[in-house]
């Protein structure tokens, strides 16, 4: 609806406003000059997987065999779809976060599985709770999708809660798909462990990594998965028949990204953290909005129920009357109603302008 309109402040798509770091672009050019223009192994070039294995050990405390436990994918999306196709049979149940990234549900439907939403609650900082998952487990539960820092809420998960969920996975024997698309965008003190690095979880966790957000590489379509060899093998065979493998040049760019200096990631992290503070403080000061400061990703998900409108209707009104473009919470699942998502991976000036327009407009809806 916003497309083609003038004077809009777009805060919708999760697209970092940074350019891909130049050393990564140079590595891709060099890859072409060096002849990396041909088919690769369906799991990706072995030398790239070896670099990814070193990254996993260095940064995530995960030891993975590059020959059997790592798969290069077409974005994080590749891991999502292949995990579902490899594991989920018609009738199997998949528990996934709601509000959540829209594809988590769609991929279950594509495989004939039954999507079972687990509510992420505002009062828990939108971190999923083991007790809420437990209430949904049946003998058909095959897979649990976790995503923290979370899209669309920015919620993060405590180590304690992860451990409770890990106990459930062992007790009820299901696999966990841990979506780490926002791995590098945690704003708390501690450097959190990944779910797949918890004791006993390597055997039953597929971890999704993406270069899209971490290195501002959304268009390169490159990511990777790590997990048990048997599942990675099934995913590799499926990948062969869909896309063969991600582009050889993107694979080499990804290798340069993980092998190279990481100050570009720190710069983005620190910038997003500052913007999170600005947008949170600004929205909190607007009459009618309720928001706790989220712990990660680059989204805020304020409660807008005080205005008495469905989230879609409020988003449309904001577009028409203020030019601020947001995403209605109901677009992220049934439990997203009553909220709006703002992406703050945009220029600080745009955030400040949007806050000003909202502050002038929103309180009037309460009268
Ligand atoms: C939670 C989450 N997972 C996965 C993806 C897929 O990203 P990509 O395929 O670009 O790596 C996204 C994209 O927005 C996301 O927000």
Image (tube, rainbow, N blue to C red):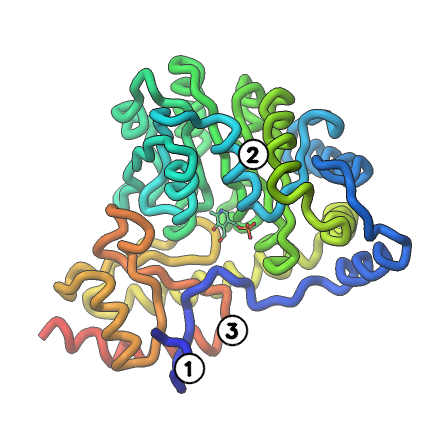
Q: State the residue at coordinates (54%, 36%).
A: 82
> Which is nearer the eye, 38 or 283?
38
Query: In what element is the residue under mark 2?
Result: strand
Residue extending farthest to the front is 241
Q: Is residue 186 left or right of residue 73?
A: left
Q: Mark 1 falls on what kind of element? A: loop
Which of 36/257 is in front?
A: 36
Q: Position of residue 218 (x, y in %)?
A: 59, 58
User: How far from the left and from the top, in percent, is residue 283?
Assistant: 31, 66
Q: Residues within 10 Å of mark 3 (few under 14, many from 20)?
A: some
Residue at the spot of label 1: 4
Extreme-right residue of the structure:
34
Mark 3 or 2 closer to N-term? 2
Mark 3: is the Cβ under 8 angstroms from ligand 1?
Answer: no
| Cβ of mark 2 under 8 A from ligand 1 | no
Q: Residue 163 falls in which quadrant of the image? A: top left
Q: Which residue is mark 3?
A: 347
**Which secondary structure, mark 3?**
loop
Foreground label between 3 and 2: 2
Residue 207: which numbered mark, if any? 2
In this rendering, does residue 51 appear at all? no
Point 51% across, 39% down: residue: 81
Question: Nearer the viewer's eye, disc 3 or disc 1?
Answer: 1
């Amino acid at each position: 609806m916003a497309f083609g309109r003038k004077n809009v402040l777009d805060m919708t798509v999760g697209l970092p406003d940074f350019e891909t770091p130049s050393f990564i672009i140079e590595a891709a050019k060099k890859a072409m000059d060096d002849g990396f223009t041909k088919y690769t192994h369906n799991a990706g070039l072995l030398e790239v997987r070896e670099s990814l294995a070193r990254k996993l050990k260095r940064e995530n405390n995960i030891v993975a065999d590059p020959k059997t436990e790592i798969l290069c994918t077409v974005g994080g999306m590749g891991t999502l779809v292949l995990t579902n196709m490899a594991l989920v049979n018609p009738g199997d149940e998949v528990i996934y976060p709601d509000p959540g990234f829209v594809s988590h549900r769609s991929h279950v439907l594509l495989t004939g599985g039954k999507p079972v939403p687990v509510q992420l609650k505002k009062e828990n900082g939108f971190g999923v709770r083991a007790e809420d998952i437990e209430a949904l487990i049946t003998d058909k539960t095959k897979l649990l999708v976790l995503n923290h820092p979370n899209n669309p809420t920015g919620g993060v998960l405590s180590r304690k809660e992860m451990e409770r969920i890990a106990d459930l996975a062992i007790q009820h024997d299901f696999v966990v798909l841990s979506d780490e698309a926002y791995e590098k965008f945690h704003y708390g003190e501690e450097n959190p462990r990944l779910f797949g690095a918890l004791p006993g979880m390597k055997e039953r966790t597929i971890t999704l990594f993406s270069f899209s957000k971490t290195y501002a590489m959304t268009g390169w379509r490159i990511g990777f998965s790590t997990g048990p060899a048997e599942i990675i093998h099934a995913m590799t065979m499926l990948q062969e028949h869909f896309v063969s493998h991600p582009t050889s040049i993107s694979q080499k760019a990804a290798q340069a990204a993980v092998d190279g200096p990481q100050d570009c990631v720190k710069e983005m992290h620190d910038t997003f953290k500052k913007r999170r503070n600005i947008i949170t403080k600004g929205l909190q000061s607007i009459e009618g909005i309720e928001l706790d400061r989220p712990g990660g990703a680059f989204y805020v998900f304020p409660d807008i129920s005080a205005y008495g409108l469905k989230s879609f209707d409020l988003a449309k009104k904001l577009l028409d009357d203020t030019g601020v473009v947001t995403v209605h919470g109901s677009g992220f699942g049934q439990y997203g109603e009553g909220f709006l998502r703002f992406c703050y991976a945009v220029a600080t000036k745009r955030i400040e302008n949007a806050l000003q327009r909202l502050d002038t407009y929103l309180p009037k809806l309460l009268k």
